Amino acid sequence: MASGEKQSVNEEMFFCPIYQREIDAGLCWEICNLGKDGLCLQGNEQLPCEWKEAVKRCEACPHSLEWE
């Protein structure tokens, strides 16, 4: 692992319809839960779309059901 690279506790990856790529399950959980509550992500993480659109994409994703 390179210096400064974050190591994920949960190495499970899911395809994200928001980012259009594989993301860590932890980020998936964060987006799914925070988006529904209207909160913002912490740190550098930026969504490639508005929260309203992200929530619509999340609700259509089968992984969002895993977090309910």
Image: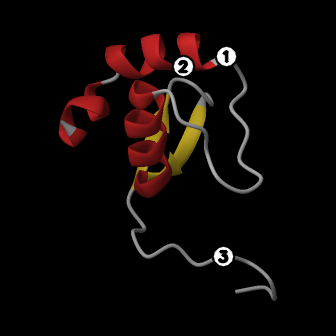
Which callout, 2 or 3, points at the residue further toward the start of the chain? 3
Q: CA distance from mark 2 to mark 1?
A: 6 Å
Residue 29's disc is none
Asked whether the beta carbons under mark 2 and mark 1 sit within 8 Å of each other, the answer is yes
The residue at the point 38 percent across, 46 percent down is 29
Q: Is residue 40 or residue 49 the one in the foreground?
A: 40
Residue holding disc 2? 54
Q: Residues within 10 Å of mark 1 (few under 14, many from 20)?
A: few
Question: Percent x, y for residue 48?
Answer: 73, 26
- The secondary element bearing badge 3 is classed as loop
Up/down of 31 relative to 13, above or below: above
The residue at the point 60 percent across, 38 percent down is 40
Left or right of residue 65, residue 64 in this image: right
Residue holding disc 1? 50
Q: Amino acid at mark 3?
A: Lys
Residue 6's disc is 3
